[in-house]
Amino acid sequence: MRLPFLFFALLALASGPPLAAQSAFDAIDPDDPSPFSDAEVVAEASGVAPGESVDVALMLTQDPTWHSYWLNGGDAGQATSIDWRLPEGITAGPLRFPYPEAIEQAGLVSYGYSDEVALLTTFTVADGAARGPTRIEGTANWLICADICLPASAEIAFTLDIGTRTPDASGAARIARARSLLPVDARGWTVEAIPTAAGGFDLRVIPAPGWSGSLEGAYFFPETSGVIDYAAPQPVRREGEVWVLELEGSQIEATPDALEGVLVAASGETFNEGSRALAVRAPVPQLVAASESEPEVSSLWIALLLAFGGGMLLNLMPCVFPILSIKILGFAEGRGTPEATMRRHGLLFGAGVLVSFLALAGLLLALRASGEAIGWGFQLQAPGVIAALAVLMTGMGLWLLGAVEFGGRVMGVAAKADTASGARGAFLSGVLATVVATPCTAPFMGAALGWALVQPPLAALVVFAALGLGMALPYVLLSFFPAWLQRLPRPGAWMETLKQALAFPLFLTAAWLVWTFGTQTGINGAALLLAALVLVGFAAWVWGRWAPASGSVRLTSRALVALSLAGALALTVFGARQEAQASGARGAWERYDTAEVAALVAAGEPVFVDYTATWCLSCQANKASTLHTERVQEAFRARGVHLFVADWTRRDDAITASLDALGRSGVPVYALYPGGGAEPVLLPEILTPGIVLDALDGVSSSVASR
């Protein structure tokens, strides 16, 4: 029973009853040890043979409006207990409780029983027990509550004639009814509790094969106290074959290893053996860091340090190379600019990065709070965003080649980010750097962002801000210490050559984006995007060739540019609507399936899951350098590891939920389930064959020897 409730109950008894409970106090018989309730014992047999067992029920009959409690009393309550005094040769099993009902009073929700309830105990008689009538006694204690709560007790007893089994028809019928209300084993069912960003759990239930009922209206009674908010509703949604109960969390400090309790179906629905209640133990995935590069995040300060370090390392990821090249050009051209201007531009660039990270984080948190299953890099799951980035990269490449000058327009502003006069451009280049960096995840980022997304919004935003500060810091420092720029060659013709050369990393990026777009939309979608890019190139050429003209030539050229861009937009939109199967299984790798992975893990089999996306450059680099190498593949085969690809290229709620369960919000993520019941191990974002082979050393030896 919770202390606050006890406090108020005792206070009520000590200081005088409230008006609402006055009649109850008046009706209390001080000599009655079991007020407003009665207890009796019922056995299914009056006689039993040595070596046999017999079920006995404590029957509690409660006055109207009064109730007693289940194993977990909910917001207030205390479970019924029996202290048996057993003769030699007889043992008693644990008290078995039928599934409870939710009882709401004054905004509190308790779990218990009204009217009559039967609590079962199984008695076993030893082979050598003395024959003849044997009396078994005990003391039952329970809490009986209505507007007030009162302790109740009863001395109970029954006699077993040990010798020959003698059924009791009346008792057997009552015991049979009591058994029908016990939760049954969840054999064949898969239940897992996935922590949510809001601090609760998604209870994911995969029915046993052949079950065709509905879990609409189902309710989960947790046996563990203080894990969920008892008063919160438990909405149910369906994701394919998976039923999901949304459980709001309580203010617990640590995530439990498992949620144990009873899942009760709505009236008219049944589970195994015709029962309305399943006894479930839903494991809550726990993580083990694979290396020192992914330390455990236990506080906000550690998350901030990891996010800041991850942000700095993000500058070394391939996603940022195109912008890095533009920054180098900008610093070279800006050398000689007044130091105050350089510092201002550096700060504006940092502000652009910071604002962009906060904007993306805010949108991400808002969408997750509304129930969207998304994570870091979510915007790249939209083909339209990929296409827009491809157009942007192509346009910037054309600008670097000198095919077009955009003047003060948006593209030009972004492109002139690093020139001494481009104040707005400095800010927009920070925005652009953030946008193009999202396909990558640097070391330390995964742990920090995974932690942040399950924290309150303010803490999460602070962590994202630290990530942005880390990414912007090198550029801001360079702008504050322009003397470092003196090591660059003096301005000259080489700068134009460098400018044109830097166009090609942008074209390569555009090519990669087209490939990503094609994996999302198919070959037809990719072809349409390529055609759109040709129109963008045509528009750039026309603009660059005839923009200075006047009169009809000027009007015609601008009309052509407008038509070309409109055609490019139409082709992109049409292409984004194309559908294609996302890339996934390859060779020994199977497409990710939640149920199959859960079944293999439950069976003790080793499993490796590659959480990836085609727009994730780090993912592709890890595949080429490590995962698809013959050495690593042979190690997987030798240890019998089941390989799965969780392709997150397009939105997939099941994969997002799985990432959430691992404490991650983006890809790449590499989860190794060593088998034999061991906890999953997360590998770092940047893989080497040595890292994977070292992790495989932890695969259960009994499994590996098969």
Image: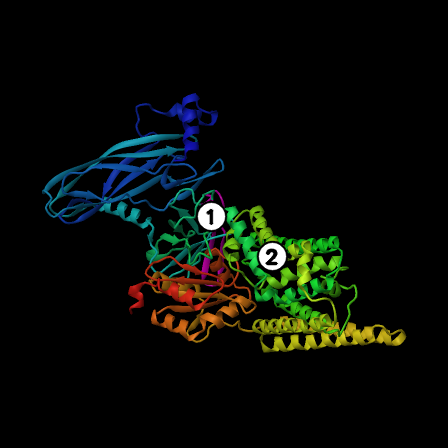
Could you say where residue 507 lies in the image, as x and y percent from the top left? 65, 73
Quarter of the image with the C terminus is bottom left
> Closer to the camera: disc 1 or disc 2?
2
Q: What type is the residue that disc 1 sits on?
A: Ser
Tell me the number on the disc at residue 67.
none
Could you say where residue 94 lies in the image, as x and y percent from the top left? 26, 44
The answer to whether residue 245 is magenta is yes
Quarter of the image with the N terminus is top left
| Secondary element type, mark 1 | loop
Q: Which residue is mark 2?
A: 471
Asked whether the residues under the numbered discs 1 and 2 touch, taking CB atoms below 8 Å apart as contact, a structural biologist would say: no
Q: How did the renderer colour the structure?
A: rainbow
Q: Which residues are magenta?
A: 228-249
Q: What type is the residue that disc 2 sits on?
A: Met
Residue at 64% across / 67% down in the picture? 322
Q: Picture quarter containing residue 601? A: bottom left
Q: Nearer the viewer, residue 331 or 492?
A: 492
Residue at 36% across / 33% down in the picture? 144
| Secondary element type, mark 2 | helix
Could you say where residue 428 lies in the image, as x and y percent from the top left? 70, 59
Q: Nearer the viewer, residue 304 or 221?
A: 304
Residue at 46% across / 73% down in the picture? 585
Dot 2: few (<14), some (14–19), or many (≥20) neighbours within 10 Å? many
Q: Picture quarter containing residue 141? A: top left
Dot 1: few (<14), some (14–19), or many (≥20) neighbours within 10 Å? few
Q: Which residue is mark 1?
A: 298
1 or 2: tag closer to the N-terminus: 1
Q: Is residue 218 above or below residue 22?
A: below
Residue at 47% across / 46% down in the picture? 249
- Tell me, yes or no, if residue 577 can be seen here: no
Image position of 412 (left or right of 303): right
Q: Nearer the viewer, residue 176 or 594?
A: 594
